[in-house]
Every structure is written in C-alpha cells, then in structure tokens.
C-alpha cells in the first residue's frame, strides 16, 4: 500500500463562545517537519499537539494552523488592538479591500486576542484535540487516495519496463550476432593471416564483455522486488527509492554494454520510464 505525503485535512468545532478551526496541509519532505501556527494563548500546548501530529504523520512538511473566532460573549478576552491594526495595515499593502473585510481577515491571525485566563479550559482543550484527531483522519484519508493514484502509475511504469526488458531479451541474440559479424568483417578488412583457433578464442573473450545475461536477471528481480514492496502492508517510499536506484544501475549497464543502436533505443525508453517513477517517488511516504 502506497501513501502520498501530499494531503489536506480540516475540522471545525463550535464551542459556546468561540469557533475553533484546525487545518493541516502536507507536502513531501525527507523527514517530518511541522510548522505550527496558533494563537499565543495556546502556545503552552504546542508540544503536545505536535506529538499528536507526529504520531499520525511519519514524514512530510506539515503546516498546522489553529484559528479561533469569537462567536459569543467572552468576558475574559479582549481584542489586541495594536496587533489587529498592524495586521490590517500589512494586509492593505497586499490586497485591496474594505476595512471590514480586512478586519475579518486580521482577526483570524495569531495573537489578535488577549485574555486574562492563565490556563486553557480543560473541556476546550479536549475539544481541540478531538478536532485535531478528526483533521488528521481526513489528511490520512487524503494521502491514501493520492497513494492509490501513485500506485496505479507505478504499476503501469513497471509493466512498461518489464515489456521493454522482454524486448531486450528477444533482441539480444541478434545483437550478439551483429557484433560478431562486425568484428569478423573488421579483421577480414585487415587482410592478414590469423590462427583460426586463436581468433575464435579472442572473439569469444571480446563478446563476453558485451554479455548482459546477469544484468537482465538482476533487472527482472529488481522490478519484481519493487512490485512486492509496493504491495506490502506499509508505505515504504525510502525503500522503493533504493530499489529504483538499483534498477537504474542495471539499465545503465545494459546501455553501456549494448553496442547496438536498436537496443540502446530500448534502453533510452527504459530510462525515461524510470525517471518518471523517480519523480513521483518524491511524494511517497
């Protein structure tokens, strides 16, 4: 099962006096990189919220946003006028809009409210963690759906590589015969007397350098291993990346040994398919 690192999840929870919105966006990254953006009042819980996210999302560049909108009486909270005004001025430099619209946008930014409360209400924090869990479920579902599309693309590319490998196998006897004929002609053009047995030994030795039997076997094994890993229970993006590198090595070696234009054309097609796999591999968890 393949899971993408690209995803989006959102959940809104309505409390008696405020609406809390949690958004999660993720892109590909070698490790887990969480960029948290939440009001100052909730900063004390940031580490705990990060741990919850880390337990659900193994890798990826994750943007975590927590927005708070006051919808009722909140006697302990006041608008931080200086911060709001500064936000409105910055927004006015970016977009044209009425003051009311700019105010609505500014109030969604961090630290626009100041409160006299020392601690986050326990019920409120429980609602936040439940909302975060639901947003995480949505982003994981999104990643799984993206992963299915990647898996279909990989399966198509691997099939194409296997078809090209079969074409290489079918062409190999013709290639060796052509190379042998070319060498024999080159020697004949020299118009010198040669020992037939010695010439045959040297010719066999020379042709062995062009033998790609091992490369064909290893490439077939790597392609099979790629499919097996792709269909395993867990998403193994790094492992698939390593297998792709091994596939590339065998293709390159076949190309360097081919010495036959029709086979080298097949190798170019194989490299093109592999490159498309590698591009998509960056998004795999």
Image (cartoon, grey):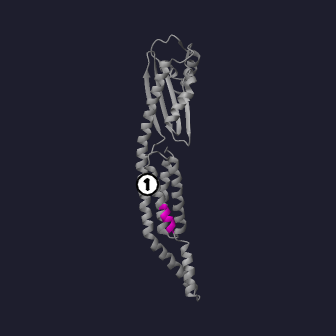
Would you say 46 lies left or right of 265 here?
right
Q: Nearer the viewer, residue 93 or 43?
A: 43
Residue 100 screen position, x and y as percent: 48, 18
Q: Main secondary structure of the magenta part?
A: helix
Q: Which residues are magenta?
A: 212-219
**Measured along the vertical axis of the image, is residue 198 above or below residue 216?**
below
Element marked by disc 1: helix
**In this orientation, does residue 50 appear?**
yes
- Residue pictured at 46% horizontal, 64% vertical: 266
Please state the horizontal and vertical placement of residue 274, each as a whole percent of the image.
49, 55
Inspect this view and state whether residue 98 appears: no
**Depth order, front residue of 69/247:** 247
User: As rendered, which of 168 and 16 lies closer to the eye?
Assistant: 16
Task: Please provide percent x and percent y for residue 239.
Answer: 52, 50
Instruction: Provide residue 62's location: percent of width, then percent of height.
Output: 52, 35
Q: How many discs appear?
A: 1
Residue highlighted by disc 1? 157
Left or right of 8 in this view: 40: right
Reply above or below: 175 against 186.
above
Residue at the image position 56 percent from the left and 36 percent from the top: 33
Q: Is residue 225 magenta?
A: no
Mark 1, other Cα within 10 Å: few <14 / some 14–19 / many ≥20: some
227 w.r.t. 13: above or below: below
Task: Give the residue furthest to the top.
Answer: 75
């Amino acid at each position: 099962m393949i899971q993408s690192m690209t995803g989006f999840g959102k959940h809104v929870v309505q409390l008696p006096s405020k609406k809390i919105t949690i958004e999660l966006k993720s892109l590909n990254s070698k490790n887990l990189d969480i960029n948290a953006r939440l009001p100052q009042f909730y900063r004390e819980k940031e580490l705990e919220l990060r741990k919850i996210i880390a337990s659900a999302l193994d890798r990826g560049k994750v943007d975590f946003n927590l927005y708070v909108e006051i919808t009722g009486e909140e006697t302990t909270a006041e608008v931080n006028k200086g911060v709001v005004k500064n936000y409105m001025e910055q927004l006015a430099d970016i977009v044209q809009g009425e003051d009311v619209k700019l105010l609505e946008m500014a109030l969604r930014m961090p630290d626009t409210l100041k409160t006299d409360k020392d601690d986050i209400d326990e019920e409120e924090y429980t609602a936040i963690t439940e909302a975060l869990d639901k947003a995480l479920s949505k982003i994981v579902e999104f990643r799984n759906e993206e992963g299915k599309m990647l898996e279909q693309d990989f399966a198509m590319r691997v099939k194409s590589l296997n078809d090209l490998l079969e074409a290489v196998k079918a062409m190999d006897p013709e290639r060796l015969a052509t190379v042998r004929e070319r060498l024999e002609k080159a020697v004949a053009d020299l118009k010198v007397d040669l020992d037939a047995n010695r010439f045959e030994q040297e010719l066999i030795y020379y042709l062995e350098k062009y033998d790609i039997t091992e490369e064909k076997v290893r490439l077939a094994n790597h392609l099979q291993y790629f499919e097996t890993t792709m269909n395993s229970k867990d998403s193994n993006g790094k492992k698939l990346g390593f297998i792709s590198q091994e596939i590339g090595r065998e293709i390159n070696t076949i190309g360097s040994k081919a010495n036959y234009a029709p086979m080298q054309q097949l190798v170019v097609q194989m490299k093109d398919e592999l490159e498309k796999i590698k591009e998509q591999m960056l998004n795999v968890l």
